[in-house]
Amino acid sequence: MEQPIPHHKYFDSQKEGEEVLLILRRHWVVYFPAFLMALIVLIICIVIYLNLDTIGVTSNSYFMSTLTKVGISIFFLFTVLFVYISWLVNYLNFHLVTDQHLVDIDQLMLFSRKISELTLEDIQDVSATQHGFFQSIFHYGDVVVQTAGEKPNFTLEKIGNPYEMSRQVMEIKDKYGEDTVRIVGNEEGNDKVAG
């Protein structure tokens, strides 16, 4: 079924020997509109930069020509930097399923991160939804993990193959999420482990 991912400490409270069984990330199509807009801006910058003489900005003075080229270069640099930081923040948003926990790692900004954990025993049900044309065509959607008690539900947004991923999470929960209860002080004085 699942293969353990090579050991790496993904979150601070990850225990020694806790195996990561599944890593879930957002589907690539979610990032496409932002990258398309950035690509259009970059193409416009390059076209303007290469046609400054034709536009007539550089023919007035050397100072104006240099100032325009530096301004467009800075704008180009910040656009590339914005695309890279956006990609990095989104890449660092992921979800882990270990043999003990479901972990939601949200990279809110470049230097701001939120990590939420849920033990496998607290998972009651896992469901998946796809809404709309694009989610159906590109096979992505939301996976909702319903929890026991007062703990909030986990929503894993825009995951690729959400139905398959929800099935895998439930299989891992069924395999590793058994409650073990220790009964102390029975008649014989031996401990029993029920499970």
Image: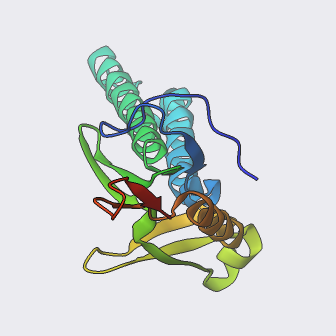
Residue closest to the eye, 65 or 195: 195
Q: Examine the rendering and report whether any part of residue 22 can be seen.
A: yes
View extreme (front): residue = 188
View extreme (top): residue = 62
- Position of 49 with respect to 112 (left or right) is right
Question: Residue drawn 43% across and 42% down?
Answer: 92
View extreme (bottom): residue = 132
Check the image and report above or below for 142 versus 62.
Answer: below
- Position of 190 with respect to 5 (left or right) is left
Picture coordinates of residue 54 (x, y %)?
Answer: 54, 33
By what rule are the colours in the image chosen? rainbow
Picture coordinates of residue 1 (x, y %)?
Answer: 76, 53
Residue closest to the eye, 193 or 52: 193
The quadrant where residue 73 appears: top left
Picture coordinates of residue 28 (x, y %)?
Answer: 63, 53
- Position of 91 with respect to 69 (left or right) is right
Question: Residue drawn 54% across and 72% down?
Answer: 143
Question: Residue drawn 53% across and 43% down?
Answer: 44
Picture coordinates of residue 119 (x, y %)?
Answer: 39, 60
Residue closest to the eye, 142 or 21: 21
Q: Examine the rendering and report whether any part of residue 57 can be seen.
A: no
Residue closest to the eye, 47 or 148: 148
Q: How many marks?
A: 0
Question: Residue drawn 32% across and 55% down?
Answer: 189
- Position of 145 with respect to 129 (left or right) is left
